[in-house]
Amino acid sequence: MTSESAAADPEASSATAGVTLREVLAFDDSGTLRLLLAPAGQDVPVLGTGFAESGPDRPARGFLLIAVDGDANAPEAAALVRRAARQGACAVVLRDSGEAGPAPEVLEAAREAGIAVLARAAWAEWTDTATLLRSALAFGAAGRDPQGPPADDWAPGGLSALAATIAGATGGAITIEDTSFRVLAHSATRPEADGVRRSTILGGRVPEWRVAELRRSGLLRTLRTSREVIHRPADADGPERLIVAVRSGAEVLGSIWVAADGRPLLPGAARALRSAAVTAAPHLVRHRLRESGEVRRHDHALRGLLHGAGDLTTHAWSLGLAPSVPCAVVAVDAGTAPAPVGPAWDRTLDVLALHAASYRPAARVLRERERLLVLLPVASGKDREALGLARELATLAASLPDGVPVLAGAGAVVPSALGAPASYEEASLVVRVLREKLARGDGARGDGARGDGARGDGARGDTGRAGAAPGEAGPDGGRGAEPDGDRSPARWASAAELGPAVDVRRMLDAVGPVWEAGSGPLHALVRADLAAGGELVRSLAAYLDAAGDITVAARRLVLHPNTLRYRLRRARERHGVDMDDPDTRLLLTVAVRLAGGF
């Protein structure tokens, strides 16, 4: 166990005396914990919480232990349960890694030892679980600590009940706010309430102009650094106010504001507010955990739906989507691999996520590693809606003052949310193809093969089709690349616009392992030459790209035709690679594309 163990923290038992397992579970309204078995019932006292660790058994009487390495679905976790019972723990938390349910061996061990077993939801993190348990104990013990405010001083219930109680103890109007100045609860408002309070409550948050004013005055800095109640005298803009930060240790969780509401504040208002801040702390932690739990549940469900993991129908309902709704996926990634890291990239993704959520309220947005994924319900069933969003996101990123340009791929519309994995796979492939074209300097055309200035003499066999360039099919006609004007590569597209390029990418992914496992003269040539810089392979690629026209290929390589002829002869004589053989040409084409396309 950590230093949170009973042996290391003798005050833990008195601080949480009387808090039961039932109260701990009732505190968790985020669904982080699930009770699997409680042989001794749910009214057993919980005296503290800590982490189960390897090594000698340590006393943990009455503690709820977190077994980070324990999987409720694995029979091996039964040993962890027995060990926790030997230490005197009242309960142990294991992770829930699957849908099969807890292993019978785990439940049998708990039943024999008389210890409760809880499972942590797959979407939750251990750090959140530990915070949840500590906050549950603090919340349950509120009013039981002889050094704290008496239990009768504060009404039971949530933040709204607490706000009403503080109003009675201070004689003022109350708002309880989080660190983003959102109103979490407020007391009743009298007709005489000042304009700032009315606009704050009606808007659900402190107005931006007011926050800016408080920041300029230095009050917010004082609020963050001081543990005392701050007094703000009445002025022309509003009545007298008392403010105090709500803290958990050194961390500020929010604040409580008391405003004189048509009458003076009570004489003991500051003292009452100070006590209220202590009582409010577990409430605000609970609110924060609930919010983070909702975010994690959303991300877990969306990730599972996109990757085809778990019960897709359950994931869809968890996201508030009917499984039958048509949808498409838009993938946003960087133009380089790996993606850039740093504040500019983070801000770019944050702005794009906010844009997608704000202008497509039905969209579900996931930031996965260093990319952005958007699941877009498409009522019309038309691909142009997803392509329009891809265009918007790529254009917005390019317009940000310190933004990082992105690539955006739109997957095909699938008739059901359960088909989201297919749309996600296609959107991801589109981004990969766009990145490859960007690296080659290709302005992608409908068939995925528009050349740049270095190659653009029309000698390639893939001269393009009539129709839209990637990004051209957006609702307002915006373009990702101009086929006859701007030669810059496209930054958004759908698979339909890229034509065969996406299917080629799929084929290359499939044959890649076959090439890597192969051997022979061509394999030896490609591997050795790439290790030496790739000059010969580059020459062979240009020859193939020019459909065997040595003059065209030499011009693209900025070589004399005889130099290219010499290199082709060297490939045949030294390496046994005959470029007149169609199978050799096909295999070399695949090898060149796998190596990056040159």
Image (cartoon, rainbow, N blue to C red):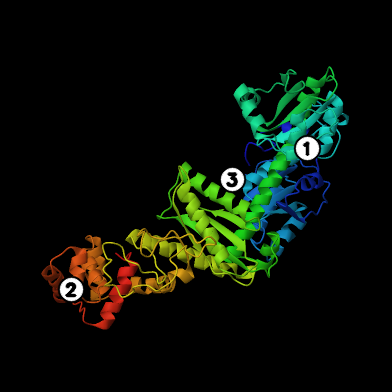
Answer left or right for 496 relative to 4. left
- The residue carrying pointer 1 sits among few (fewer than 14), some (14 to 19) or many (20 or more) residues within 10 Å by Cα, namely many
Q: Where residue 435 appears, x then y in whole percent? A: 40, 60
Q: CA–CA distance between discs 1 and 2? A: 77 Å
Pick whichever of labels 3 and 2 is earlier in the sequence. Answer: 3
Q: Residue furthest right?
A: 152
Answer left or right for 424 relative to 226. left
Residue pointed to by mark 2: 550
Q: Where, quadrant-wise, is the N terminus in this rendering?
A: top right
Q: Point out the frontmost of discs 3 and 2.
A: 2
Answer left or right for 133 relative to 265. left
Q: Where residue 225 appears, x then y in whole percent? A: 62, 24
Instruction: Provide the secondary structure element on which disc 3 rests.
Output: loop
Closer to the camera, 65 or 347? 347
**Above or below for 29 versus 162:** below
Q: Amino acid at mark 1?
A: Ala
Instruction: Provide the secondary structure element on which disc 1 rests.
Output: strand
Residue pointed to by mark 3: 55
Label pair 1/3, CB-CB below 8 angstroms: no
Residue pointed to by mark 1: 185
Instruction: Provide the secondary structure element on which disc 2 rests.
Output: helix
**Above or below for 221 versus 525:** above
Q: CA–CA distance between discs 1 and 3? A: 46 Å
Closer to the camera, 325 or 15? 325
Label pair 3/2, CB-CB below 8 angstroms: no
Residue 48 visible in the picture: no
Closer to the camera, 238 or 325? 238
Pick whichever of labels 1 and 2 is earlier in the sequence. Answer: 1
